[in-house]
Image (cartoon, grey):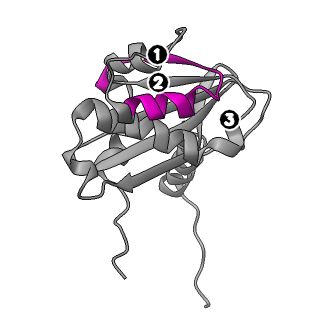
Amino acid sequence: KDVVFCWNDECQTAFDKSKELLGHCFTLTHYNPDNEIIITTDASAYGLGAVLSQKVNNEVKPVMCASCTLSAAEKNYSQVEKEALGIVFAIKKFHKFIFGHKFTLITDHEPLKTIFGNKKSIPTLSHSRLQRWAIILSGYEYNIIYKKGSEVANADGFSRLPLKLNSG
């Protein structure tokens, strides 16, 4: 109260920087069913991360992010099973956005391209858990792409900093 407000160059610079950060790619955007849908997933030793993104003006923008902590049993899964669980987690979490729409699924675990990729049947020598998950994914129209871990940093960050389970 009774303080003179002084807007100087430092204030203007801070304001401009704030505007720039608000428009940055880490800012969530609204879902538009007409835009290309991209789901990026990752798994770490103790959590899963997923990001639903869309291409807006040739720029990939996040729409929704999700993460969870692995249960004690899930922590014992092999790495391929953890990565596959990350995909199933994302599909279930983002179901209302992707069901009935074609989307691109990005993973940093290359074997999943063969297990969940375009094929005529589910690999018969796969672990039964992976076969069940492949059946779940067969209800969706998607293209699976492998990218190096450094290229899926958004989902990787969520898998390494998952939400804690509420123990009561």
Q: Quadrant of residue 36?
A: top right
Q: Residues within 10 Å of mark 2 (few under 14, many from 20)?
A: many
Horizontal arrangement in the rendering, residue 24 relative to residue 110 (left or right): right
Residue 1 visible at all: yes
Report the residue marked by disc 1: 145
Pick whichever of labels 1 and 3 is earlier in the sequence. Answer: 3
Pick whichever of labels 1 and 2 is earlier in the sequence. Answer: 2
Q: Residues within 10 Å of mark 1 (few under 14, many from 20)?
A: some
Horizontal arrangement in the rendering, residue 83 relative to residue 103 (left or right): left
Q: Is residue 95 magenta?
A: no
* Above or below, comparing residue 57 to residue 51 in the picture: above
Report the residue marked by disc 3: 98
What is the total number of numbered labels drawn onto the structure image? Answer: 3
Query: What type is the residue that disc 3 sits on?
Result: Ile
- The image shows residue 123 at horizontal and vertical percentages of 40, 15
* Above or below, comparing residue 98 to residue 3 in the picture: above
- The image shows residue 136 at horizontal and vertical percentages of 55, 34
* Above or below, comparing residue 62 to residue 101 in the picture: below
Q: Are marks 1 and 2 in contact (CB under 8 Å)?
A: yes
Report the residue marked by disc 2: 106
Query: What type is the residue that disc 2 sits on?
Result: Ile
Say which element carries label 2.
Answer: strand
**Real-space Cα distance between discs 1 and 2?**
5 Å
Query: What type is the residue that disc 1 sits on?
Result: Ile
Horizontal arrangement in the rendering, residue 70 relative to residue 85 (left or right): left
Magenta residues (range) = 130-149
Pick whichever of labels 2 and 3 is earlier in the sequence. Answer: 3
- The image shows residue 59 at horizontal and vertical percentages of 61, 24
